[in-house]
Image (cartoon, helix red, strand yellow):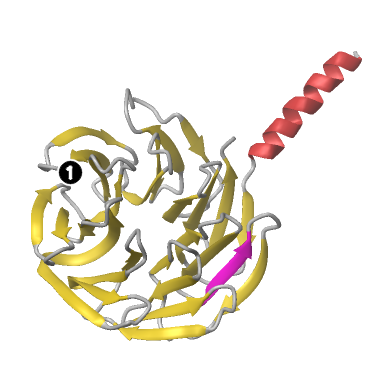
């Protein structure tokens, strides 16, 4: 009898451990999440114009950064973790870490900014908007160049590990590969039948991954844009994509409110894991630096922290 009770207790404890930690602090749709490089902090932002800093270990709000006058679409920590960049429709705000002071305000080189990223070495800061990717030197904040093309709106940004290439997921369904050395388009991939909402590059720099509102996730060979594999992740549309730090797993978030985990390689007839908890569409995803946790942001105004161990 005692053994049976222990089994029930263990099962209940395991089920409880798999429940996500729900973080409530935003008053509107949450559109972006980002872990600090040391994994101790999580930043979130959205339609309420605020950037919230959470202590990952406790799930408590550490700081609220106020300064944006419009909804925030993108977040990125610098590689060393000493700065946090956040972008609204017009401005990129850069904050010091851990002082949480406004370091710089950068005027976007196009309108309707939706994405922001640092290069792997931290020497440049990029922000994607309508028809353009703006590039600034960092930390100087001087305009380096504007990379322009027929990309519609740049919804997502990713850098190759070498920093030689930037990838954008565009509103016209294409994935654009930009040469960071000259600012020109190296390759345009006709990737999806609807807007691309997420892009990522594998740690070895060999492949790119894209996700679109057509519901599909696709893996591309970065060197020539050849399609490696494709699968349907969320029939109602994929709104968020994240690649684990080791490059072995993909996380997708859908308009259906589900978060799904997939192997990057191998059969994908069904997700390896499905995470339920959000009450509305998932807008953003981020793996922790050690790959053991996943953060998801939703239209339900919450951020959820999932233990993947």
Closer to the camera in the image, 248 or 237: 248
Closer to the camera in the image, 184 or 229: 184
Q: Which residues are magenta?
A: 50-55
Q: Which residue is mark 1?
A: 222
In the displayed orientation, state which residue is furthest to the right: 2
x%, y% of residue 151? 13, 64
Would residue 174 be visible to someone looking at this image?
A: yes
Residue 151 against residue 47 in the figure, above or below:
above
Residue 145 against residue 233 in the figure, above or below:
below
Residue at the location (32% across, 23% down)? 267
x%, y% of residue 296? 49, 53
Residue at the location (28% across, 83% down)? 142
Q: Secondary structure at mark 1?
A: loop
Classed neighbour count for the residue bearing mark 1: other residues with Cα under 10 Å, few (<14), some (14–19), many (≥20): many
Residue at the location (51% across, 65% down)? 44
Quadrant of the drawing holding the N terminus: top right
């Amino acid at each position: 009898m005692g053994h049976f009770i222990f089994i029930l207790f263990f099962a209940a404890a395991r089920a409880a451990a798999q429940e996500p930690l729900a973080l409530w602090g935003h008053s509107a749709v949450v559109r972006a999440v980002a872990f600090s490089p040391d994994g101790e902090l999580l930043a979130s932002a959205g339609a309420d114009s605020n950037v919230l800093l959470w202590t990952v270990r406790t799930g408590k709000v550490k700081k609220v950064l106020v300064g944006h006058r419009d909804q925030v679409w993108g977040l990125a920590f610098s590689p060393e973790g000493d700065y946090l960049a956040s972008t609204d429709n017009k401005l990129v705000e850069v904050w010091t870490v851990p002082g949480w002071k406004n370091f710089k305000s950068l005027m976007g080189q196009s309108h309707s900014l939706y994405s922001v990223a640092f290069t792997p070495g931290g020497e440049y800061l990029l922000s994607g908007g309508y028809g353009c990717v703006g590039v600034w030197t960092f930390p100087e904040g001087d305009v380096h160049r504007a990379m322009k093309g027929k990309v519609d709106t740049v919804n997502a940004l990713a850098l190759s590990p070498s920093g030689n290439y930037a990838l954008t997921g565009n509103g016209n369904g294409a994935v654009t590969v930009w040469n960071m050395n000259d600012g020109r388009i190296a390759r345009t991939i006709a990737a999806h039948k609807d807007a691309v909402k997420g892009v990522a590059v594998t740690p070895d720099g060999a492949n790119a991954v894209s996700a679109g509102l057509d519901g599909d996730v696709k893996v591309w060979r970065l060197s020539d844009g050849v399609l490696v594999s494709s699968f349907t992740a969320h029939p109602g549309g994929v709104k968020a994509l994240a690649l684990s730090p080791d490059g072995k797993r993909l996380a997708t978030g859908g308009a259906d409110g589900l978060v799904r985990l997939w192997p990057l390689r191998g059969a994908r007839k069904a997700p390896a894991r499905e995470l339920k908890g959000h009450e509305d569409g998932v807008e953003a995803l981020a793996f922790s630096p050690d790959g053991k946790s996943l953060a998801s942001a939703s239209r339900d105004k919450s951020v959820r922290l999932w233990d993947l161990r």
